[in-house]
Image (spheres, rainbow, N blue to C red):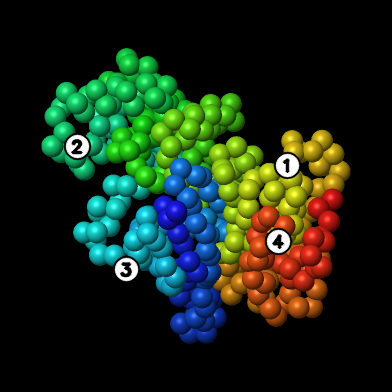
């Protein structure tokens, strides 16, 4: 079976200048630095990591919003990395995005019904109005918006209602791929759960394929069939959510998981506190990008980049795990 989305050794580097010298010192910001993943049809990949780790850049690359520096993206088997604008336009219709801030994503001058119907009007102008209206009404029902909200405007809605409009709009063209970049982080915690449950239900009922990005492990855990943990532009661990969250192997994932009190009651006591903040992605550390904060770092970590290798049902990029005798791994407690 062909994956719907397949990304191979994808990179996005920026030339930047650091202060110093007359014109500054040239440096490279490796926002995304050689990541590979696949999403099979009907599945959801959750991308998790702290802000600045390259999650949003990955979304923009996949959607063709920014050019890639190196690597390859295939959509439904077709190489899209080198595509021209006209081809992108056709493909974009098959990929839709849900952003963090629903108000910013909506047009303040359009009513709820017009927002939801607009993509159909743009991409399928031949659709008769009656059919479009019917589709809008059914989308509103799908996302749990009452019929009488059709004539309201974004500023008259709550945050949760606005995000429902954004979701209905994103689904209006029956996209093959839905990309959600922190789609619930701007909402109140109580509303977050409702919108997540809605997305989870829609995922079951419509069978969409999704790339779901969040800094929140709980969110990713609920929404994903596979998860990938990012740190400084790289994927450091990936696998099924129960594997990655119950038996994290990478020291960074272990620290992230140890900070979630709900997974295990005693987590607070076992919490792994990392030293310092994530390093600046400009001139990121050599070798393993995590070595400056890793409690288990060994000499090799400073010079050699660990490859993302299959181990006990998931993939881990860590010298300690990958060099360990088969089945040993490093303790998660
Ligand atoms: Fe830590 Fe070394 Fe593993 Fe990186 S490779 S996570 S520094 S032990
Ligand atoms: Mg982001």
The disc label shown at residue 121, or none: 2
Q: Earlier in the sequence, mark 4 or mark 3?
A: 3
Does residue 108 sit above or below 294 in this rendering? above
Dot 1 falls on a residue whose secondary structure is loop
Query: Farthest bottom residue?
Result: 22
**Where is residue 323 shown, x and y percent of the image?**
77, 71
Q: From the viewer's perspective, is the residue at label 4 or at label 3 nearer?
A: 4
Residue at x 25%, y 64% (from the top left corner):
84
Which of the two marks, 2 or 4, is nearer to us in this view? Answer: 4
Residue labelled with disc 1:
260
How crowded pointer 4 is (Cα within 10 Å; few <14, some 14-19, many 20+) is rated as some
CA gap between label 4 and label 1 equals 24 Å
Q: Earlier in the sequence, mark 3 or mark 1?
A: 3
Residue projecting furthest to the top: 148
Q: Position of residue 247 (x, y in %)?
A: 75, 50
In the rendered structure, the answer to whether residue 58 lies left or right of residue 251 reads left
Q: Residues within 10 Å of mark 2 (few under 14, many from 20)?
A: some
């Amino acid at each position: 079976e062909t994956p719907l989305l397949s990304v191979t050794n994808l990179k996005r580097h920026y030339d930047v200048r650091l202060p110093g010298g007359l014109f500054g010192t040239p440096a490279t910001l490796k926002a995304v630095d050689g990541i590979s993943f696949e999403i099979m049809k009907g599945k959801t990949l959750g991308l998790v990591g702290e802000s600045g780790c390259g999650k949003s850049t990955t979304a923009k690359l996949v959607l063709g919003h920014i050019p890639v520096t190196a690597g390859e993206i295939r959509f439904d088997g077709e190489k899209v990395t080198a595509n021209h604008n006209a081809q992108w336009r056709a493909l974009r219709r098959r990929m839709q995005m849900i952003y963090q801030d629903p108000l910013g994503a909506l047009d303040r001058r359009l009513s709820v019904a017009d927002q939801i119907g607009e993509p159909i009007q743009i991409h399928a102008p031949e659709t008769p109005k009656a059919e479009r209206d019917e589709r809008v009404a059914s989308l509103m029902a799908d996302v749990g918006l009452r019929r009488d909200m059709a004539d309201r405007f974004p500023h008259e809605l709550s945050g949760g209602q606005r995000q429902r409009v954004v979701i209905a709009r994103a689904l209006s063209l029956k996209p093959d791929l839905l990309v959600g970049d922190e789609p619930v982080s701007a909402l109140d915690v109580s509303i977050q759960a409702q919108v997540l449950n809605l997305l989870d239900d829609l995922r079951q009922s419509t069978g969409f394929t999704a790339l779901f990005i969040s800094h929140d492990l709980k969110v990713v855990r609920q929404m994903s069939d596979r998860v990938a943990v990012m740190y400084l532009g790289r994927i450091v661990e990936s696998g099924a959510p129960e594997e990655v969250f119950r038996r994290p192997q990478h020291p960074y994932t272990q620290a992230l998981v140890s900070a979630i009190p709900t997974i295990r009651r005693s987590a607070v006591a076992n919490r792994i506190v990392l030293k310092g903040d994530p390093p600046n992605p400009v001139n990121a550390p050599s070798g393993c990008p995590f070595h400056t904060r890793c409690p288990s770092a060994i000499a090799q970590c400073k010079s050699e980049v660990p490859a993302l290798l299959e181990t006990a049902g998931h993939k881990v990029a860590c010298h300690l795990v990958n060099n360990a005798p088969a089945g040993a791994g490093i303790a998660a407690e």
